[in-house]
């Protein structure tokens, strides 16, 4: 009770900035997307959000998201600065993400405002989520600049928000249909269908289904040299065991009964069988692993405003995940494991406006997780958060929050139990010197707490029951400048830069113990992370028909292990974190046609803790190109797209010994009514 009392006091005493949610009007059809290249009202959205958020996120939305030659959410997120993607190759390869070198488990992924969880290993495979049903992807460092959120959202070191499309209908229509077919290299077949139905002006129903099939067999070159420079291997071969067959079905029911009130229901189902392409070590191909996934969840949200100054939001979710992993490699011990995860989640959040410029909020989340296999373990988690926000004279915005995390676990008997509760604060601020000039300065300080996953603690021959939780401390200072114009050639310009310093205490890592299939977990001690993120965007219009948009991102980062000065790798860059990375996007539109180019660069890095020549991993980069056109036939719109990915057919590894595809092609046809 003393702690709860402290949270209530903090909610009223800690200054911060008010957040205002805003719906963004996005093109809901191919024709609207292609014809709106000279409609300038869509461009003003960025400026509006800059005025309402303390630290605006990186966003991909609308036509920009559609033109990125991306098959999954993981492919699109590569274009954000400060992000590292682990991609194990091919259409079916597992893809995870971390931000600013703090680990995938520190990253919260939210689907329509509710977090996607995985208590078993703490990682979310973003390759399972298609862009077919996604309208917007937003990446926040620290946390979202909105105190009206669930308690759990205050706990992540970084957050990715995936927002599915809200049904929109043409004048006089109550039905919207969209069918698409993608086909390409490696026998890729990817049909999808979307149906949206308007029951009445307030209630709508949507359904989206998709199938992905590919044999995953692509050519690659495997070349390795010894530390002395002599050639060890130089082989051209075909990647095996990268096939995937997956089906995804989603359905939603949305009821917007007033300007402030709505409720939503959403159901998701994913079923796949895939090969797990193994590492290529010493010219030996491993191909005996298979993976079956069945993932489903049902979630519901309710939100409304009462008495003009008090708002309430309730979220609920139930999820079930089935995973079967088989390893038939005759060089390794046979493995056939089945994991069943269950999750129940409930969140209640409220916000009260004391004045027009001062808001406070209180949120409580409850979650139960259970894992079944040869072990039987369950975990009950509670989060309690209080926050406050202030907007002072339209120049200074402040936000502060405090989060209490409480975990109760039932599993193996342990004499020394890790800490099961933690209080973590967060402080955010922004300053805009002049209303007429779009220049904003911002800063934040935040702590993020990660409790070990089930695999970290209990996995046989790997888990360590005495692991300590991670604690990440984040510091960030940045500035942003933006211009938007309604006429002329020069339409919009935006540049943003952030400098950050993070410390991760007791970072949890895994390393091989004896045979390669046996690993152990330990706490690293202390990792210091310094970096700079820079992004810029420019839009030019030439008459009514031509528009050119360019976007660049750059990250410089050091992430060094400073645990023990006696270690040979003390002060070295931690594995797979490049010093330099970046991306570029260029989109040229003429009437209903578009030419799109994208570029990704990842600089030199090391694949082990010691930064020596033997562990050096060379830089890689890719060029992607696509061309598209749209045509209107009465009430039906057709769109065709042709893509070339890895245009220069570069040989590269994102993860050592997991070669990526060379040049490949993809074609798509979309019919919309």
Image: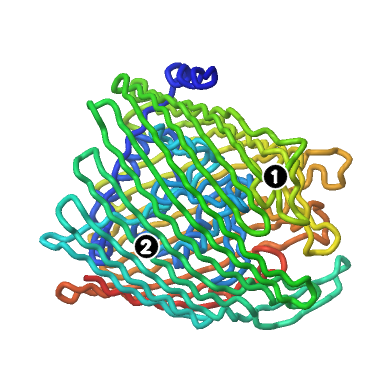
Looking at the picture, how far across and down is residue 461, in whole percent? 78, 56
Looking at the picture, how far across and down is residue 88, in whole percent? 63, 66
The residue carrying mark 2 is 250
**Rendered view: 333 above or below 152:** below
Viewer-proximal residue among 299 and 208:
299
Q: In the rendered image, which quarter is residue 589 located in?
A: bottom left
**Rendered view: 52 above or below 633:** above
Q: How is colour applied across the structure in the image?
A: rainbow
Q: Is residue 326 left or right of residue 588?
A: right
Q: In the rendered image, which quarter is residue 663 located in?
A: bottom right
Q: Residue at x 56, y 33 (%)?
A: 405
Q: Is residue 658 left or right of residue 75?
A: right
Looking at the picture, how far across and down is residue 665, in whole percent? 48, 78
Q: Residues within 10 Å of mark 2 (few under 14, many from 20)?
A: some
Which label was assigned to residue 559? 1
> Mark 1–mark 2 contact, CB under 8 Å?
no
**Mark toward the viewer: 1 or 2:** 2
Q: Is residue 456 something one can see in this rendering? A: yes
């Amino acid at each position: 009770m003393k702690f709860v009392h402290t949270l209530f006091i903090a909610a009223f005493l800690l200054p911060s900035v008010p957040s205002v949610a805003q719906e963004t009007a996005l093109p809901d059809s191919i024709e609207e997307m292609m014809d709106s290249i000279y409609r300038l009202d869509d461009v003003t959205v960025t400026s509006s959000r800059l005025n309402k958020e303390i630290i605006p996120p990186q966003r991909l939305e609308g036509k920009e998201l559609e033109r990125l030659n991306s098959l999954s959410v993981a492919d699109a997120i590569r274009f954000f600065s400060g992000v590292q993607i682990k991609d194990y190759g091919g259409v079916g390869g597992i893809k995870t993400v971390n931000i600013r070198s703090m680990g995938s488990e520190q990253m919260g992924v939210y689907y329509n405002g509710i977090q996607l969880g995985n208590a078993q290993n703490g990682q979310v495979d973003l390759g399972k989520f298609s862009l077919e049903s996604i309208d917007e992807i937003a990446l926040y460092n620290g946390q979202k600049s909105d105190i009206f959120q669930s308690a759990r959202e205050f706990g992540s070191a970084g957050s990715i928000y995936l927002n599915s499309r809200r049904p929109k209908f043409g004048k006089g229509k109550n039905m919207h249909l969209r069918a698409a077919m993608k086909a390409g290299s490696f026998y890729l077949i990817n049909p999808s269908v979307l149906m949206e139905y308007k029951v009445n002006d307030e209630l709508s129903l949507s359904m989206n289904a998709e199938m992905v099939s590919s044999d995953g067999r692509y050519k690659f070159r495997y070349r390795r040299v010894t530390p002395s420079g002599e050639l060890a291997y130089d082989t051209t071969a075909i990647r095996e065991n990268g096939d995937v067959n997956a089906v995804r079905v989603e359905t939603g029911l949305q009821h917007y009964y007033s300007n402030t009130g709505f409720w939503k229901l959403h159901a998701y189902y994913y079923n796949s069988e895939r090969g797990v392409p193994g590492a290529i070590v010493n010219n030996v191909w491993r191909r005996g692993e298979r993976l079956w996934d069945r993932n489903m969840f049902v979630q519901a949200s309710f939100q409304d405003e009462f008495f003009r100054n008090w708002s309430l939001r309730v979220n609920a979710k139930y999820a079930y995940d089935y995973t079967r992993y088989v390893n038939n490699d005759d060089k390794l011990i046979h493995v056939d494991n089945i994991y069943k995860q269950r999750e129940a989640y409930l969140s209640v959040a409220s916000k009260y406006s004391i004045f027009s410029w001062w808001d406070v909020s209180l949120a409580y989340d409850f979650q139960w997780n259970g894992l079944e296999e040869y072990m039987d373990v369950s975990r009950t988690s509670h989060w309690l958060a209080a926050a406050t926000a202030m907007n002072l004279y339209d120049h200074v915005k402040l936000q502060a929050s405090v989060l209490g995390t409480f975990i109760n676990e039932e599993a193996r008997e342990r004499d020394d139990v890790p800490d099961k509760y933690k209080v973590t604060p967060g402080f955010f601020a922004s300053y805009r010197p002049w209303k007429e000039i779009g220049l904003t300065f911002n800063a934040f300080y935040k702590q993020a707490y990660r409790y070990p996953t089930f695999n970290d603690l209990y996995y046989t021959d790997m888990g360590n029951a005495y692991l300590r939780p991670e604690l990440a401390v984040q510091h960030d200072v940045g500035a942003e400048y933006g211009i938007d114009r309604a006429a002329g050639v020069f339409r919009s310009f935006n540049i943003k830069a952030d400098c950050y310093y993070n410390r991760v205490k007791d970072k949890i890592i895994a390393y091989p113990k004896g045979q390669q299939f046996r690993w152990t977990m330990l706490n690293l001690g202390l990792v210091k992370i310094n970096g700079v993120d820079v992004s810029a965007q420019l839009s030019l219009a030439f008459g009514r028909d031509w528009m050119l948009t360019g976007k660049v991102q750059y990250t410089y980062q050091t992430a060094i292990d400073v645990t023990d000065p006696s270690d040979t790798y003390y002060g070295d860059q931690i594995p797979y974190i490049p010093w330099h990375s970046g991306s570029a996007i260029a989109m040229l539109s003429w009437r209903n046609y578009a030419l799109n180019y994208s570029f990704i660069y990842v600089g030199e890095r090391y694949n082990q803790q010691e930064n020596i020549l033997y562990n050096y991993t060379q830089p890689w980069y890719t060029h992607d190109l696509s061309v598209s056109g749209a045509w209107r036939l009465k009430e039906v719109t057709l769109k065709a797209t042709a893509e070339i990915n890895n245009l220069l057919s570069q040989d590269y590894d994102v993860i050592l010994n997991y070669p990526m595809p060379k040049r490949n092609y993809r074609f798509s046809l979309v019919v919309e009514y």
